[in-house]
Image (tube, coloured by chain):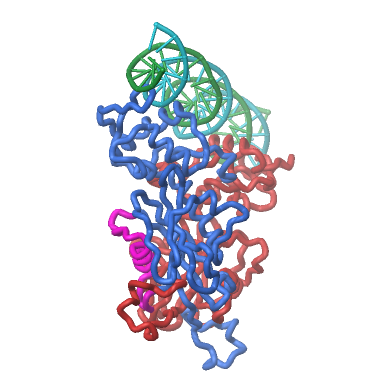
Chain colours: A blue, B red, C green, D cyan
DNA sequence: CACCGTTATCGTCGGTTTGACGCGAACAAC
DNA sequence: GTTGTTCGCGTCAAACCGACGATAACGGTG
């Protein structure tokens, strides 16, 4: 407590208790849509524990005074080379099980970055490798990640999926000019679910401020499709919900 | 990082850098519905900093190995005397701004407890007082809380409000047998918004598994109302949404 | 008992959103 | 021209919404 802890430390001589300090880390679930798949940046650990095993990028605070979110941005920049200006970076959750690191006590504040256009990560430091990896392969039963990173990744993916329901974020994964089909593919890739092209078209075009028609058209085999640019809206009104069977909630 | 941090520490001699350690606290937004109002447990700080100022209950980890969620449960039990069996306790967010505590670096993992039937808190330790306080009074412009606790409380209240939209939690704040009006009052109190009794009645009675009629009736002035028990459902299908004007989204 | 105020419950109405799906338009390839 | 493909419009029934009228069933008052 801010005040002395009156019950847990009551039996202890007062001068024996000092505020415990633990190592604080940040971990990053950096997600993107690439080559038709939802992918995450994984590094291969070069040192123990879990040497050789894939893990989420992350690290300890650089110094005692570093802001946690700043540490997340710093790690993101270091791992991906991305300049963090136009970045969706949001706190996911803090994982603090006492045994999550076999060496010592570590609690990790996890952040989710779900952004397009990131470059390929470059392995460095104690990371033997760093790559974009398809999420569905990582989340399969047999696949393993270091620490509790598989659970963290699962939480991050669920958060990313639900963000598409309520925000216009999906359009950011499309080229500057894109068709409704391009946009639909982003949804299908992230949700892992096929959507009816006609109903999807009706929904996205009826949300004010989501799509701005450019007048242009593209053709890729069938009837030419109208081109759109991203509109000013950031929230979807109404939302584009997944089928309830896939989420459990709602 | 799990591996050495290759850029932030690159300029430093390798042996000069050790993993920084910070104090980790938990803070609790313990919300309930009491005497017709949404209330939160606040303590009055007995020591600096912010001595004499109201604050959320919370505290540092008892020892280096204590689980974070266990620390939250421990603090909850200490402050309220509640046995934490049937408890909704969920992680809200971690607040880690470097200057949030004027004395030293502290990051705090915040939890939300939104449960009925808690006893009155008993002040102790360095807390000069502990009480249930109406949330709306605390969130007013002129009101102040220690540290960043006002922001934390605002986040907690928003979370609690949205939980009523998607879950059957509100029924837990009603007696074992209750009327639709009892349930509606919970919604109105938490949301700070009046609801149409007729539409509310239609909605809650049409959600499968939410309410189970007991056959009994109560009378409190007007026409006797049917009595219900809580049903097995935990999620609301369809959801009972607030009017969009109050939330911004949707 | 008649009446009234109050609350509960049912029902109606028009509007919106939904999923399922038919259909023709507009292209490319052959 | 024919075929295959994608696109985009339209239809339909079902679900759901907010607004609100109407009635039922009390307790209280005259």
Q: Height in image: B166 above or below B67?
A: above
Magenta stretch bounds: A62-87
Task: Give coordinates of residue D19: x percent, y percent.
Answer: 44, 31
In-front residue for pair B83/A67:
A67
Query: Does the segment drawn in magenta span residue B121?
Result: no
Q: Height in image: C23 above or below B205?
A: above
Task: Give coordinates of residue B90: x percent, y percent.
Answer: 55, 61
Q: In the drawing, does residue B25 fall left or right of residue B104?
A: right
Quadrant location of residue A227? Answer: top left
Query: Does the segment drawn in magenta span residue A85?
Result: yes
Residue drawn at x 55%, y 78% is A103
Outermost residue toward the left in this view: A215
Task: Give coordinates of residue B126: x percent, y percent.
Answer: 50, 82
In-front residue for pair A93/A179:
A179
In-front residue for pair B81/C29:
C29
Q: Is residue A106 visible?
A: yes
Outermost residue toward the right in this view: B215
Residue drawn at x 53%, y 51% is B163
Task: Give coordinates of residue A234: x percent, y percent.
Answer: 34, 44
Count of numbered marks: 0
Location of the C terminus of chain A (image quadrant)? top right
Q: Is residue B76 visible?
A: no
């Amino acid at each position: 407590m801010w005040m002395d802890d009156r019950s847990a430390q009551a039996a202890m001589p007062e001068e024996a208790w000092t505020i415990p300090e633990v190592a604080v880390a940040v971990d990053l679930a950096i997600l993107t849509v690439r080559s038709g798949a939802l992918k995450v940046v994984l590094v291969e650990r070069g040192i123990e524990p879990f040497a050789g095993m894939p893990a989420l990028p992350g690290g300890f605070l650089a110094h005692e005074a570093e802001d946690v979110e700043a540490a997340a941005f710093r790690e993101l920049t270091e791992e991906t080379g991305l300049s963090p200006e136009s970045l969706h970076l949001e706190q996911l959750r803090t994982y603090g099980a006492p045994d999550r690191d076999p060496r010592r006590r570590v609690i990790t504040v996890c952040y989710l970055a779900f952004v397009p256009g990131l470059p390929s990560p470059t392995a460095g430091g104690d990371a033997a490798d760093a790559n974009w990896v398809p999420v569905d392969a990582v989340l399969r039963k047999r696949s393993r990640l270091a620490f509790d990173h598989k659970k963290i990744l699962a939480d991050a993916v669920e958060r990313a999926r639900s963000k598409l329901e309520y925000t216009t974020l999906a359009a950011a994964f499309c080229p500057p000019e894109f068709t409704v089909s391009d946009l639909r593919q982003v949804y299908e890739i992230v949700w892992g679910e096929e959507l009816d092209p006609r109903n999807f078209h009706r929904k996205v075009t009826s949300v004010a401020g989501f799509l701005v028609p450019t007048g242009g058209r593209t053709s890729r085999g069938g009837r030419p499709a109208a081109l759109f640019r991203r509109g000013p809206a950031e929230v979807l009104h109404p939302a584009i919900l997944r089928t309830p069977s896939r989420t459990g909630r709602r």
